[in-house]
């Protein structure tokens, strides 16, 4: 058994435990759906507000639902810094997209008109793949492909633009909810007596 | 073909830390080595040990001075966390080194 225990694998498993509950997946899906709603109803501000609300909801759920079931770990300082930088990067990228979207709707050059949404969704797909690589969560590569398929669909398959966001966003949310339900089933809240054995 | 020096092999094997040389305790130490601290629920979920086993192994590690119970706060509420001590870190590192050397010195490896 000893020789099978690889510290790198354990580090990876610990790190991956942050993503096993599906909440970040749900957040990503809702972010894409938010884009779809904002384009469909022409309410760009809705997207920003919705995303911020969901982001804080995810953090709250982590504390109230996830940690009592999966336990709590404090990462090493270096890991913590890396995680913070990645999260900061994600927030900045998402805000960047929002700002880009808001301004580009009115001021984009004529040549960009035909491919604007295709490029925007493709850029999002690339960011999702980069996040998958950073976080070493391989299913995010699949999300990236699904998002890119949405970009292709709305560009060349005569699909309404908002569906290019709704379909990938919906698939990701449904999968994220599946992961979340699976997590709740796999990790029921330990009862008081069990925890008292330790403390 | 070169044969291992039996004296070296003996030293490496007899010098192995028996507290850590138990799969469940090694696993607990491995998890604590990659984190600053973790709570018992996290260790139980990751190692798959029963609560009773986890408690018993943690007591042994605590008695050896390898693991310390610390009182931390989570959302401003007191929360019991477990942390590998400096002594534990050294012991864990030495154990891994000794095991590596012992395995390398075995004939046929």
Image (tube, coloured by chain):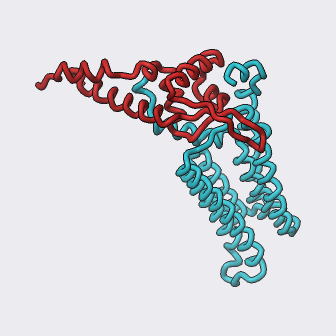
Chain colours: A cyan, B red
Q: Is residue B66 left or right of residue B101?
A: right
Position of A1 relative to A59 (above/below): above
Would you say A49 lies left or right of A116 here?
right
- Which quadrant of the figure has residue B58? top right
Q: Name the residue at 73% across, 44% down.
A: A23
Residue A175 visible in the displayed image:
no
In the picture provided, is A113 more to the left or to the right than A4?
Answer: right
Question: x, y (%) of residue B10?
Answer: 25, 18
Q: Could you tell me if residue A112 is visible in this image?
A: yes
Picture residue at 67% right of the left edge, 78% below the top: A112
- Foreground residue, B5 or A108? B5
User: Closer to the camera, A75 or A183?
Assistant: A75
Q: Give the x, y percent position of residue B96.
A: 38, 30
Residue B56 at x, y = what percent? 59, 16
* Residue situated in front as seen by the camera: A106 or A16: A16
Count the labels in the image: 0
Q: Quadrant of the N terminus of chain A?
A: top left
Q: Quadrant of the C terminus of chain A?
A: top right
The image shows residue A82, relative to residue B82, as above or below, that is below
Q: Residue at x 42, y 30 (%)?
A: B91
Image height check: is A191 above or below A20? above
The residue located at (78%, 37%) in the rendering is A65
Residue B90 in the image: x percent, y percent? 42, 34
Q: Residue furthest left?
A: B1
């Amino acid at each position: 058994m000893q020789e099978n225990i690889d510290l790198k694998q354990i580090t990876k498993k610990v790190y991956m435990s942050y993503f096993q509950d599906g909440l970040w997946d749900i957040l990503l899906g809702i972010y894409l759906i938010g884009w779809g709603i904002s384009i469909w109803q022409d309410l760009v501000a809705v997207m920003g507000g919705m995303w911020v609300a969901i982001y804080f909801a995810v953090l709250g759920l982590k504390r109230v639902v996830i940690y009592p079931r999966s336990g709590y770990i404090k990462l090493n300082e270096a890991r913590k810094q890396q995680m913070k930088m990645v999260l900061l990067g994600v927030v900045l990228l998402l805000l960047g997209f929002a700002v880009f979207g808001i301004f580009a709707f009115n001021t984009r050059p004529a040549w960009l008109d035909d491919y604007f949404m295709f490029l925007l969704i493709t850029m999002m797909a690339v960011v999702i793949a980069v996040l998958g690589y950073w976080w070493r969560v391989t299913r995010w590569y699949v999300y990236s492909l699904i998002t890119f398929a949405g970009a292709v669909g709305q560009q060349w398959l005569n699909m309404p633009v908002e569906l290019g966001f709704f379909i990938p966003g919906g698939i990701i949310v449904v999968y994220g909810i599946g992961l979340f339900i699976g997590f709740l089933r796999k990790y029921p809240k330990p009862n008081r007596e069990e925890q008292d054995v330790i403390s | 073909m070169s044969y291992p020096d039996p004296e070296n092999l003996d030293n490496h094997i007899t010098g192995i830390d028996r507290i850590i040389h138990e799969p469940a305790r090694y696993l607990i130490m491995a998890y604590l080595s990659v984190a600053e601290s973790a709570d018992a629920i996290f260790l139980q979920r990751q190692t798959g040990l029963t609560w009773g086993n986890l408690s018993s192994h943690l007591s042994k590690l605590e008695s050896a001075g390898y693991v310390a119970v610390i009182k931390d706060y989570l959302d401003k509420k007191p929360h019991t966390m477990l942390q590998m001590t400096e002594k534990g870190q050294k012991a864990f590192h030495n154990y891994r080194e000794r095991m590596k050397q012992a395995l390398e010195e075995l004939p046929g490896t």
